[in-house]
Amino acid sequence: MAIFKDERDLTLTAAGADAAAAFDHAIEGYLSMAPDAGDRLKSVFAADGDMAMAHCLKAYFMMLMAMGGLVPKAQAAAAKAQELAVDATPRERMHAEAAGLWTARDMEGAAMVWEDILLDHPRDILAARLAHFANFYSGDARRLRDSVNRIMPAWDADVPGFSYLKGMQAFGFEEAGDYARAQAAAETAIGLEPNDPWATHAYAHVMEMQDRQADGLAWIDRLRPHWTKANNFQNHIWWHEALMMLDQGRMGDVMAQYDAHVAAPESEEYLDLCNAASLLQRLEIMGIDVGDRWRPIADKVRGRTEEHLLTFVDLHYALALAAVGDEKVHEMREFMAAYEGPEDDSNLPIMKALGVPLVDALIAYRDGRYDDVAASMIPVRYEIWQMGGSHAQRDLFDLILIDAARKAGNGNLTRALLAERRAAMPHDHWTEKTFAEAAA
Ligand SMILES: [Fe+2]
């Protein structure tokens, strides 16, 4: 083993320059959400089967899929990385440690290690992008924003990957509510590298949060030749486009988009399942008969009710099971209530504090016990951010609460909730229509 430099001048322990170059290529695949990122990692292993960072990346890629069945394989990769990292640099050893923590379900512990790496190595874009993921699912927008801004002084446009960092900065600013800076950062990112699905997506969030559907749709459409090259993350951009159509009241277009690009019938990826469940639920709330479209989602998640990697994801699985009246959702609820974890399972406190009451609310909603939905949701509604996901995604829970209040015949609560929503989204078609009905 020898020491090489990666594209950003970080030391990398590898068998040869070809392995180091292959590693850079794999990282670029991760950042650009290339469909062949997994194949690029295989090329690293072909060049150097004993590279600690390659085994780390394998563990990371598996954990990023948030799929319970992959966790044991990810743990094995992390263990191998730790074994090999004994002879590597301190930074690489820290990555191996983070992989070990994450695969033991301690994502918060891993995030602290990634942030520590970044203090000494602010150009470690792998640590930055992984911290971005963990910070996103912590729900803490300030963490998401500050994590990127802390390292920005070490970067400029000449450092490979700078555009991807600007895309992350855009999303951090957006979730923290700084829409002007978010938009500027996304425009810089896309100006440098139009094939950046994350920056494209950050801009779509800026438009969604500002109720600027026409601008958001134009942006997504202009960049379509680029982001449609992405892996399944492109389905999430199709979802954002559908959301803006929904805001405009174009229900037929939304349904067509769902069938063509959001349903993702071949996919088992958590984000695809969340996109599909959340769009179907929105359509139903807005009075659209979605037919038997819930069924394939419920079929895919039925065997995944004890994964509990992210409460945000669990709730979307519960949504689909409850929608088809599957008893599994009750088992899932009991499992969540009884789960004791490993103690440092980052998802454990969120599952207890938010997962259980919100699954109760989803079950009550499908049972037609609409007063119980409000009773379960209202005490936690200002804590829901702690399960992570974006403001745009979590808006689903506000919509469910409004719909339950409406169906419970609770006029005061319905009007109050709609008044909140109307202030934030004055051009939203359904909100205006429903507010007028409730006021009458
Ligand atoms: Fe999004």
Image (cartoon, rainbow, N blue to C red):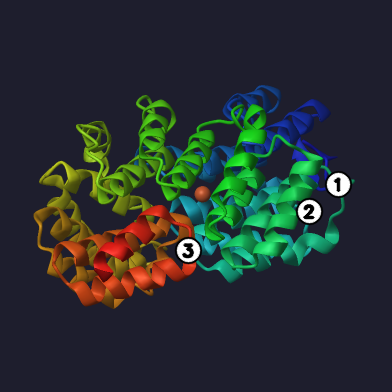
Quarter the C terminus occupies:
bottom left
Report the residue at 65% width, 67% height from top: 178
The mark tally for this picture is 3
Q: Is residue 340 visible?
A: no
Give the residue at mark 3.
426
Label 1 sits on a secondary structure element that is loop
Q: x and y percent of residue 377 in the render?
A: 25, 70
Most foreground residue, 362 or 411: 411
Q: Are marks 2 and 1 in contact (CB under 8 Å)?
A: yes
Q: Which mark is residue 123?
A: 2
Q: Can you tell me whether the CB of the residue at mark 3 lies under 8 Å from the nearest atom of ligand 1?
A: no
Report the residue at 62% width, 40% height from top: 218
Label 2 sits on a secondary structure element that is loop
Report the residue at 40% width, 53% height from top: 429
Whichever of callouts 2 and 1 sits on the residue coming sooner in the sequence is 2
Amino acid type, residue under disc 2 in the picture: Arg
Q: x and y percent of residue 230 in the render?
A: 59, 31
Give the residue at mark 1.
159
Most foreground residue, 348 or 242: 242
Most foreground residue, 256 or 56: 256
Left or right placement of residue 21 versus residue 233 in this view: right
Q: Are marks 1 and 3 in contact (CB under 8 Å)?
A: no
Amino acid type, residue under disc 1 in the picture: Val
